[in-house]
Amino acid sequence: TPYMLERTQAVAVVNEAFLLYPSIDGRPAFFTPPPVDHRQFHPDGANVRETYGLESSDPLVGFIGKVSPERGFEEGLRVFREVKRQRPEARMMIIGRGPHRQFLERLSSELGIAADVIWAGYHEEDLAEHFRAMDVLLFTRTGSDEGHRAVSEAMACGTPVVSYPIEGVNAVLGTLAHRMISNSAQPEALARNVLSVL
C-alpha cells in the first residue's frame, strides 16, 4: 500500500472508516461507496418466492455471502432463531456457496431451525429477484471487499437491511442507520431490529 500511494495525490475509499486509516497519510481522501448497477438492482420486478414455495405473507429473512468460516453465518442463524421465537412462521434464505455449509446445516439443526432455512445456493444474474423476495437482509460481518456492496444492492431492490455495528455501515445506511444497526453485536439485539422491520 505505501508503494501504491507514494505518488498518489488523492484517494477514494469504498468504506468511510478507511478515511481514518494511517496509510492515507494526510492525502485528500473521498468516500465513494461501491456503485450499484440500477439496471439489475431496482425494486420493480419479479421475485423468487414461488420458486421456493413461499407465500407472499411468509416473513423471509435473508443472508448472503461466501459460505465460509468468519463470514458471520453462525451469527445470522442465531439471530434467526431469536426472530422465530416471536415470529414462528418466519423463514430464512441463505444465498451463497462454499465449504462451510455442512457445518452450518448441523448448527441450524442444533438450533432447531433447520426446517425453516432455505439454502438457495449461489446467484448472480437473478440476485435482484432473490433480494426482492426478502422482507429483510441480515448483515453480521463485513464482506471481502469491505465496501458492504450487498447492503447497497439489497436496498436498491427495496429490501431493508439490518446490521451489527460494523465499520462503514452507517455511511451506507444513511438516515436509516439509527433504526437498522443494532446497539450491540448480539443475536438478541439484532433480532429486535429484524422484528421491528417485519
Image (spheres, grey):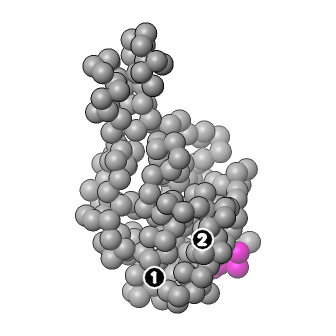
Residue type marked 1: Arg
**Relative to residue 122, is residue 104 drawn left or right?**
left
Label 1 or label 2, whichever lies nearer to me, is: 1
Which image quarter: residue 67?
A: bottom right
Is 10 colored magenta in this rendering?
no
Q: Position of residue 128 (x, y in %)?
A: 63, 54
The kind of secondary structure the magenta stretch mainly shows is: loop
Q: Which residue is mark 1?
A: 81
Question: Up-down: is 24 above or below 195?
Answer: above
- At 70% from the left and 64% from the top, the residue drawn is 121
Q: Position of residue 107 (x, y in %)?
A: 54, 81
**SS at badge 1:** helix
Name the foreground residue: 175 vs 172: 172
Which image quarter: residue 40?
A: top right
- At 70% from the left and 51% from the top, the residue drawn is 124
Name the image quarter holding the N terminus.
top left
Question: Up-down: is 82 above or below 17?
Answer: below
Which image quarter: residue 102?
A: bottom right
Q: Earlier in the sequence, mark 1 or mark 2?
A: 1
Residue type marked 2: Met
- At 27% from the left and 65% from the top, the residue drawn is 184
Q: Position of residue 86 (x, y in %)?
A: 39, 86
Residues in magenta, as a range:
52-57
Q: Which mark is residue 93?
A: 2
